[in-house]
Image (cartoon, rainbow, N blue to C red):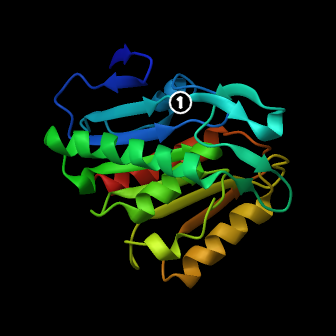
Amino acid sequence: MTLIENDQQVILEPEQPAQAVVIWLHGLGADGHDFVPVVPHLGLPDQLAVRFIFPQAPVQPVTVNNGYPMRAWYDILAMGASREINEQTLFESVVRINQLISDQIDQGISPDRILLVGFSQGGAVAYETGLSFPLPLAGVAALSTYLATDPAARLERSQGFPIWIGHGTADDVVPLTLGEQARSRLVELGLTPDWQTWPMAHEVVLDEIQALGRWISKRFN
C-alpha cells in the first residue's frame, strides 16, 4: 500500500483500484498516523483492495484538559458517569466526515462499500455520522467509545444496519458502562449491534483487531 499524507488526513492507498473505503477516526490527542500500523493486523484478504483514510482532527482547546490545545473532534466540558460536550464542535466534525464520505462516493465508491471505524472520541463521531448519514453505509465499528448525543432525532438507520462494538473491561477513560449504555440505547432504537469485550484498558489489543478485521471482511464480501 502507498502512504499519502497531508495536514488533513493520512491515506493508505491499495496497489489496485480501491473497491472499498474504511474511514478510521483517531482518539483525543492522537492523530491520523495512530492506527496506520494496525492495518496489516486486520488480516483482510489480499484480493480486497481497500483504501484506508485516517482523517486528522483539528487542533482546538479541550476544556477538561485545562483548555490545552490538541487534536480533538469536539470539546469535552466535563467527564464522569457521562460526558458533557460542546455539541456544536461535534457536529462540525460530523459535517466534515460527511463531506469526506461524499467525496469518496463522487470518486465512484458505492456508499455500501464505505465503512466507519472510530476509537474513543473518534468512535463517538463515527456513531453520529454513520447513524445519520442520508445513505446507508457498510457499517460502523465503535472502539472503546460512547454515544455523545442521543441519535434518535437524526437516526437514518434501521434494524440490520451493521454495528460492531469493542470495549475493554478495565477501561478507566471511557468506562465499560458507557459502552454498555450505548449498546442498550441502540437496541432500544431497533438496531442489533455486535458487542464484544476484552480484558484491556483504554487501548486496542491484537485479538480485538483481528476480530474487527473478520467483521470488516464480511461487510465487504
Residue identifier under label 1: 38
Q: Residue 27 occupies which quadrant of the picture? A: top right
Give how far across and how far down residue 123 sits, in percent.
Answer: 57, 49
Query: From this viewpoint, is residue 98 visible?
Result: yes
Q: Nearer the viewer, residue 109 or 98?
A: 98
Q: Residue 47 occupies which quadrant of the picture? A: top left
Give how far across and how far down residue 82 sits, in percent.
Answer: 79, 61
Give how far across and how far down residue 138 sits, in percent.
Answer: 33, 57
The crowding category of the residue bearing disc 1, from other C-alpha atoms within 10 Å (few below 14, some 14 to 19, many at least 20), is some
Residue at image point 50% right, 25% down: 36
Relative to 48, 108 lies left or right: left
Q: Nearer the viewer, residue 76 or 28?
A: 76
Three-letter amino acid code of the residue under disc 1: Val
Residue at image point 48% right, 75% down: 153
Give how far across and how far down residue 105 sits, in percent.
Answer: 20, 45
Query: Where 16 falls versus 117 (above or below)?
Result: above
Query: Where 65 falls versus 8 (above or below)?
Result: below
Residue at image point 40% right, 64% down: 132
Relative to 160, 38 lies left or right: right
Please identify the quadrant where the C terminus is shown.
bottom left
Query: From this viewpoint, is residue 192 visible?
Result: no
Secondary structure beneath dot 1 equals helix
